[in-house]
Amino acid sequence: MIAIDGPAASGKSTTARLVAERLGYLHIDTGAMYRAVALKILREKIDPTDAKAVEGIVDSTGVTLKRINGQLRIFLDGVDVTEKIRSREVAKAASIISVNRKVRDAMVKEQRRLGKDGGIVLEGRDIGSVVFPNAELKIFLTASLDKRARRRQHDLNEQGLQVDLQSVREEIAERDRTDATRDASPLVKASEAVEIDTSRLSIDEQVNLVVEEVKRLIREED
């Protein structure tokens, strides 16, 4: 089991997906799970900051992940919403509801169910510290705020959204603050996690470093 944590836009999702492909493991994008819940909340016209209203629909919300034709797809109440959860609006709502303990408890329960048999790469903000504290390998990805803002801006541009760098930078800085100070599972680096600064690394270099850590563990076990 490989747990990859880190702040927003540090390269977790892409790195985790490619590491999983390289190793033949299952990749679980935990951030996508929160986005799916956020999408439902927005569709139901619920204010993401209204904790009680948010908690009121969690029990009746089903979020599942399936691998179809080699791609991870996100299903909300049985409907594929993989593309629909990538908007800025959904991302902002997901950031807000992720501090809700009932939401986190529901998502963590599903994540543990998915990962119980191992052979899995999970990425998020509390995977190594809370969800799977006994993961065999814990990685903590970091990068400078400016680098992360440029990455997020590029991703949004690829989606056809033209956004200025400063507004993206401010959004990520606020997400950092929220993640680090929330009561429910704040973002922390697990003491035994291998920290990798991705500021000057290519995706291939990031993936290679993680895979080398996996190979190192396997050699030690042998």
Image: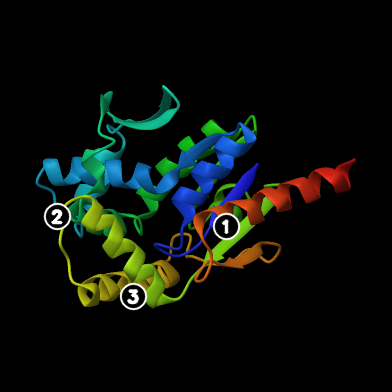
Q: Which of marks 2 and 3 is nearer the N terminus?
A: 2
Element under disc 2? loop
Q: Is residue 52 visible?
A: yes
Q: Can residue 51 be seen in this view?
A: no
Q: Looking at the image, what colour scheme do you see?
A: rainbow
Q: Which of marks 1 and 2 is nearer the N terminus?
A: 2
Quadrant (top left, top right, bottom left, bottom right) of the C terminus: top right
- Mark 1 → mark 3, Cα distance in angstroms: 23 Å
Q: Residue at x 58, y 57 (%)?
A: 205
Give the label, 1 or 3, closer to the camera: 1
Q: Which of marks 1 and 3 is nearer the N terminus?
A: 3
Element under disc 3? helix
Inspect the image, locate mark 1, and give the three-letter code of the amino acid beneath it. Gln
Element under disc 1? helix
Inspect the image, locate mark 2, and give the three-letter code of the amino acid beneath it. Asp
- Mark 2 → mark 3, Cα distance in angstroms: 22 Å
Total numbered badges shown on the rendered structure: 3
Q: Of the numbered discs in the image, which one, if any, rests on residue 47?
A: 2
Q: In this view, does 144 lie above or below 186?
A: below
- Mark 1 → mark 2, Cα distance in angstroms: 37 Å
Task: Give yes or no for contact between labels 2 and 3 (Cβ–Cβ under 8 Å).
Answer: no
Q: Residue at x 16, y 52 (%)?
A: 160
Q: Is residue 12 above or below residue 24?
A: below
Inspect the image, locate mark 3, and give the three-letter code of the amino acid beneath it. Ala
Judging by the rendered image, the residue that carries numbered circle 3 is 173
Judging by the rendered image, the residue that carries numbered circle 1 is 206
Q: Which residue is drawn at 50% across and 55% down?
A: 203
Neighbour tally class for label 2: few under 14, some 14-19, many 20 plus, Cα within 10 Å: some
Give the label, 1 or 2, closer to the camera: 1
Residue 196: give x, y in percent of width and height: 60, 66
